Image: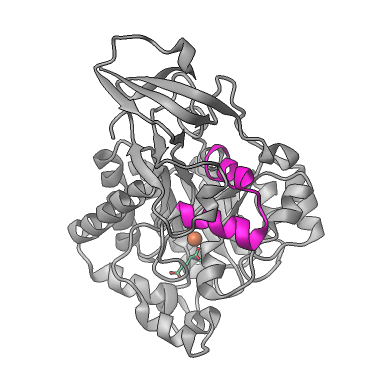
């Protein structure tokens, strides 16, 4: 089955030697072909170029993208899509002045989500997570990473990871799973931190690896969660089971988490609302992606990562949603692009590179998604008619996506 998308006003990020990662000054370059076509065979891109080179006939299906842009679907490399319940109560608490960290210290926050998830049957979790997956797909997401971390017991963490595995089977978009057993310290372990770390390392990890349930290990490296030393211990244990680190760090404090993650070959360090010169220098010399999640500081009314400083220093950054019930009840990459531009002074082109090419890199999916290249999955966004790339982050809140194609299907 062939599908031809034709008369595309501008085809973005279409290249056969698309880089795996875009850094620094290169982030503002977004390749574009005017008046273009893309040819898809089954689930893959087989050709693209200017309309003058478009095949005349032979496609069973034709999509006219007149006046529209076509670009790769978003690669959302950081989400907590599986959860049992929303947390509007804490939203009200925050409006009335209680901080996110205070809520966490009082046993709310992640522990609140964990209590609910532990009681919720797997089928119910799957049903709600699948709805969210379809929702984010409608916003243009075509590859996603999903974390555990709201289980915090052996059974509940495995339950979450099994839900993620079922989601992988139910969708045609690539899904990566991260094991985030070290998201918060369960109350039962309040006076026995090493007991919980021990449970993760000696019980959870072997079972998870045995069943092949996770691609990555994640830790919430933060004062309210786990220390750098604990994070290192967990990264080392994960490595023994073939799980590379993708780590939550520098959300509220600079504690040396970035340096530790880089030393342990982390694929990405995520959040980075706070960062110092030494940490920027460390990331510059490493292949670790800096993944920024501006919807979280938006929702928590916190300060934003210094994306401008990072990019100007030569770093690569990725953008992701962090979709979760506590700090980011939103899985909408187009809004993330707007925040990136408005609050972090990223240019529209930089934001798009960050949510596509660099997002794919942060999930080790560069060979499959992130650009429009021959052989890659046909995961693309077809916009409504628009005049420029800048319209996408500019028109925040406007539904400017017309169609989303996943594996060749609209
Ligand atoms: O990435 N910061 C740690 N974890 C999530 C939020 C978890 C929650 O509040 O439920 C995040 O923001
Ligand atoms: Fe997160």
Asked which quadrant contains residue 343, the reply is bottom right
Of the pair 134 and 100, the residue shown nearer to us: 134
Image quadrant where one finds the N terminus: top left
260 versus 85 height, above or below? above
Residue farthest bottom in this picture: 96
327 versus 385 height, above or below? below
Query: Where is residue 104 shown, x and y percent of the image?
Result: 49, 79
Q: Which residues are magenta?
A: 333-357
222 versus 131 height, above or below? below
Instruction: Classify residue 137 as left or right of residue 192.
Output: left
Asked which quadrant contains residue 379, the reply is top left
Q: Is residue 75 visible?
A: yes
Instruction: Classify residue 161 as left or right of residue 284.
Output: left
Residue at 39% x, 37% y is 382
Query: Where is residue 84 shown, x and y percent of the image?
Result: 29, 67
Image quadrant where one finds the C terminus: top left
Residue at 33% x, 58% y is 82
Reply yes or no: does residue 343 show up in magenta.
Answer: yes
Instruction: Classify residue 14 as left or right of residue 88.
Output: right
Query: Where is residue 30 shown, x and y percent of the image?
Result: 61, 35
Reply yes or no: does residue 407 show up in magenta.
Answer: no
Query: Where is residue 140 shown, x and y percent of the image?
Result: 40, 45
- The kind of secondary structure the magenta stretch mainly shows is helix
Please give the count of numbered marks on the rendered protein.
0
């Amino acid at each position: 089955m062939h599908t031809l998308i034709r008369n595309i006003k501008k085809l973005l990020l279409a290249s056969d030697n698309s880089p795996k990662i875009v850094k620094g000054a290169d982030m503002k370059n977004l390749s574009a072909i005017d008046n273009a076509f893309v040819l898809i065979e089954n689930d893959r891109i087989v050709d693209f170029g200017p309309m003058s080179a478009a095949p005349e006939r032979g496609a069973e299906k034709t999509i006219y993208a007149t006046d529209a842009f076509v670009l790769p679907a978003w690669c959302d490399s950081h989400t907590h899509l599986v959860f049992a319940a929303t947390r509007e109560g804490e939203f009200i608490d925050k409006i009335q002045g209680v901080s996110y960290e205070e809520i966490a210290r009082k046993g709310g926050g992640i522990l609140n989500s964990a209590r609910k998830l532990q009681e919720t049957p797997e089928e119910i979790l799957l049903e709600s997570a699948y709805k969210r997956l379809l929702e984010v797909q409608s916003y243009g997401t075509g590859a996603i990473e999903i974390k555990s971390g709201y289980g915090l017991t052996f059974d509940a963490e495995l339950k979450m990871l099994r839900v993620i595995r079922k989601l992988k089977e139910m969708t045609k978009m690539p899904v990566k799973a991260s094991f985030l057993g070290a998201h918060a310290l369960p109350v039962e372990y309040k006076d026995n931190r090493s007991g919980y770390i021990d449970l993760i390392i000696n019980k959870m990890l072997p079972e998870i690896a045995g069943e092949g349930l996770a691609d990555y290990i994640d830790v919430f490296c933060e004062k309210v969660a786990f220390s750098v030393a604990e994070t290192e211990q967990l990264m080392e244990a994960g490595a023994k089971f073939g799980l590379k680190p993708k780590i939550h760090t520098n959300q509220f404090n600079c504690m040396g988490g970035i340096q530790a993650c880089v030393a342990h070959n982390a694929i990405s360090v995520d959040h980075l609302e706070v960062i110092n010169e030494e940490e920027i220098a460390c990331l510059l010399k490493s292949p670790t992606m800096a993944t920024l999640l501006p919807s979280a500081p938006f929702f928590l009314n916190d300060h934003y990562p210094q994306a401008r400083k990072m990019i100007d220093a030569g770093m690569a950054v990725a953008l992701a949603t962090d979709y979760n019930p506590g700090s980011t009840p939103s899985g909408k990459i187009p809004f993330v692009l707007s925040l990136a531009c408005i609050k972090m002074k990223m240019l529209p082109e930089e934001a798009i590179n960050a949510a596509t090419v660099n997002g794919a890199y942060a999930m080790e999916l560069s060979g499959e998604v992130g650009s429009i290249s021959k052989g890659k999955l046909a995961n693309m966004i077809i916009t409504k008619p628009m005049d420029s790339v800048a319209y996408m982050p500019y028109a925040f809140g406007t539904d400017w996506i017309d169609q989303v194609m996943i594996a060749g299907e609209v």
